[in-house]
Amino acid sequence: MENMYVPAPDRYAHATFRRCGGFGLVLPPISLGLWQNFGGADVFETGRAMIRRAFDRGVTHFDLANNYGPPYGSAEENFGVILRKDFGLRKHVRGLRNELVISTKAGWDMWPGPYGIGGSRKYLLASLDDSLKRMGLDYIDIFYSHRPWNNCPLEETMGALVTAVFQGKALYVGVSSYGPEQTRQAAQILKQMGAPLLIHQPSYSMLNRWIERGLLDVLAEIGAGCIAFSPLAQGLLTRKYLNGVPENSRAKLPNSSMLQEFLSEENLRRVRALNEIARGRGQTLAQMAIAWVLRDSRITSALIGARNVAQLDDSLDAVKNLDFTEAELKEIDRYAEEGGVDLWKETREYMN
């Protein structure tokens, strides 16, 4: 007989939350993303254990997208199973739904043909309906345009997000990987249409600091939150690569999203130096990298991934030491200054 999951009764005892821009919604400082390790090709019970553990430790926000897997859609399907089995979400039964913030996105390729990618109204709204079915949900808390798209008017893409809100299928809307001016324009359109921009999800880490060149200022100006994905630079800011690239690393796979130049000897040298700073702070490199992202009050949450519960716990422990001295920040800047490869540059510049 399957063990019944009972959430930790003290899950909010030490939990902290950050306000999302000028909105009333708050998010945990660290959120769990299901980009990798939660799909149909992964061990279901491992992903299930991580989601349970995260919730027990005060993580209320779980972030997905239509094509997370592999295969595409399977992360949402698995998450839906976990919601039903462990969080009590069934037809006409809300269970723990009111304690969760669940987000999903559409924009990257999802199904064959011209209507399975991009920013069109047809694609975004059809994708949202499919996502809701896969997860067994009536609504999503945050629905994102996952990427800029130059073959569709921005008004159409933003209009689709607004329609999702008006239909009751999303409570808030967001964008991901949009540049500063694109974000300002999107926010203006959304505000005029009656569903203001809640949040932006950009890549951000010590080795990828592009959002410091305008985007953070724009988000503060318009009152939107910011949730940073890849704060560990897809694993580079962990102990995994201190001695080079392991043979079993995903980075060696032909379809890896980690560019080979991101794993250059120059970047690996920086990582080793940063690891020494982390040791001096009594943290793992991953913990310091997450804490560094959260040092800026304009960052609402750091979005992490994990392979197992131990790795998850290590990352969540970053909140135990979020303070930096000026000397530490200067030393970090010596090695983490702009110069690392930006994995998402092409996405943001796609509309320019």
Image: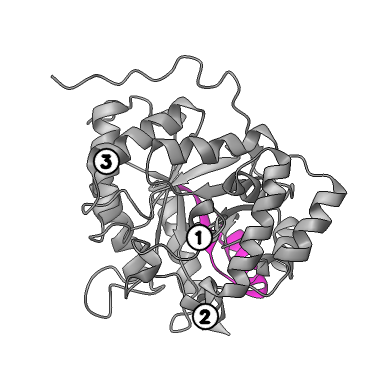
Give the amino acid type for the residue marked by disc 1 in the picture: Tyr
Residue 98 quadrant = top left
Asked if residue 186 is among those painted magenta in the image, a careful observer would answer yes
* Foreground tag (1 vs 2): 1
The residue sitting at the top extreme is 9
Picture residue at 29% right of the left edge, 42% below the top = 79
Q: Is residue 112 left or right of residue 294?
A: left
Asked if residue 243 is among those painted magenta in the image, a careful observer would answer no
Residue at the spot of label 1: 241
Where disc 1 sits, the SS reads helix
Give the amino acid type for the residue marked by disc 3 in the picture: Gly
Give the amino acid type for the residue marked by disc 2 in the picture: Glu
Q: Is residue 74 left or right of residue 6?
A: left
Q: Which residues are magenta?
A: 171-196
Of residues 102 and 285, the one nearer the viewer is 285
Q: Are marks 1 and 3 in contact (CB under 8 Å)?
A: no
Q: CA distance from mark 3 to mark 2?
A: 32 Å
Specify the color scheme.
Answer: one colour
Picture residue at 45% right of the left edge, 25% below the top = 56
Where disc 2 sits, the SS reads helix
Could you tell which of marks 1 and 2 lies nearer the N-terminus?
1
Q: Quadrant of the N terminus?
A: top left
Image vertical order of residue 110 relative to residue 57, above or below? below
| Crowding near the residue tagged with mark 1, few <14, some 14–19, many ≥20 C-alpha atoms within 10 Å | some
Residue at the spot of label 2: 346
Picture residue at 63% right of the left edge, 59% below the top = 272
